[in-house]
Every structure is written in structure tokens, then in C-alpha cells.
Amino acid sequence: QVQLVESGGGLVQAGGSLRLSCAASETNFINSNAINWYRQPPGGQRELVSFITTGGETYYASAVKGRFTISRDNAKNTVYLQMNSLKSGDTAVYYCNVGHVQGYWGQGTQVTVSA
């Protein structure tokens, strides 16, 4: 069973930045799949934030467009989510995912943005 591992979350002030990373326990798993970032705010539903295809095409939810950037480093088998100009509304647990609902999920990393 492939495991996805997120890292890079933490506490940041509004306007600050964080970079999340997603790696996998299996070599080349990240490179071979489209990678999704979801988030689940406190008391809220899990929502798709961004994804990147194997070809490098990207998608961003309207709430984060222009502030977040997703990228992949194939040499490191890692996908990153650079989050800038963070707002309190970005507070959530962020999950790395392959395959959406029925796919693989990481354990999540907490991002807390203080006002």
C-alpha cells in the first residue's frame, strides 16, 4: 500500500507564506500520477484546492488562484504547494491525494493562519 506523506504545515500570520510538500513511500509514484491537494477547514467539508497532472498542467480553486502555486520536482519525486498571502480562511488540514475520493490520501498537515 503506497503511503503519501505531507509536510510543511504550521502556524503563520496572515499575509505569510508556507510551502507544503507531498512525497510517497513508493519510488516514482508521485511522478507517475496527477497529484491533488485538498483541504478541510474546521467544521467544514473537504475541498479540492489544486492539482497538477503528469504533464504539468495545473488547476486552482478560485479561492486560492493567484496566491498558491503547485509544482512538481520529478528528481525528488515530490510535489509542492507554495502558499502565499495566506488568509485566516486558509486555515485547514491540507491533504495530498492521488485518485480523488477512492484513491490514496496522506495523513494531512495542519495549516493555521492567525489574523
Image (spheres, helix red, strand yellow):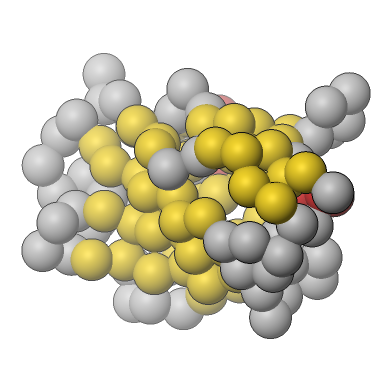
Q: In which quarter of the image is residue 19?
A: bottom left
Q: In which quarter of the image is residue 14?
A: bottom right
Say above or below: 68 vs 101.
Answer: below
Residue 3 percent across, percent down from the top left: 30, 25
Viewer-side residue, 99 vs 40: 40
Decide if residue 89 is on the left or right side of residue 32: right
* Horizontal and vertical percent position of residue 101: 61, 33
Q: Where is residue 111 in the image (x, y as percent from the top left)?
A: 62, 39
- Percent across and percent down for residue 1 are 26, 18
Picture residue at 43% right of the left edge, 43% below the top: 8
Q: Can residue 98 be seen in this view?
A: no
Q: Residue at x 80, y 71 (%)?
A: 62
Q: Nearer the viewer, residue 91 or 16?
A: 16
* Residue displayed at 10% across by 42% down: 27
Q: In this view, does 25 lie to the left or right of 69?
A: left
Kindly give the residue lying farthest to the right in the view shown.
43
Q: Find the residue positioned furthest to the top.
A: 1
Pick the residue in front: 110 or 94: 110
Q: Is residue 94 visible?
A: yes
Exactly how many numbered labels are in the figure?
0
Q: In this view, does 25 lie above or below 56?
A: above
Which residue lies at the image location 69% right of the left edge and 38% below the top edge?
Answer: 112
Q: In this view, does 107 lie to the left or right of 32?
A: right
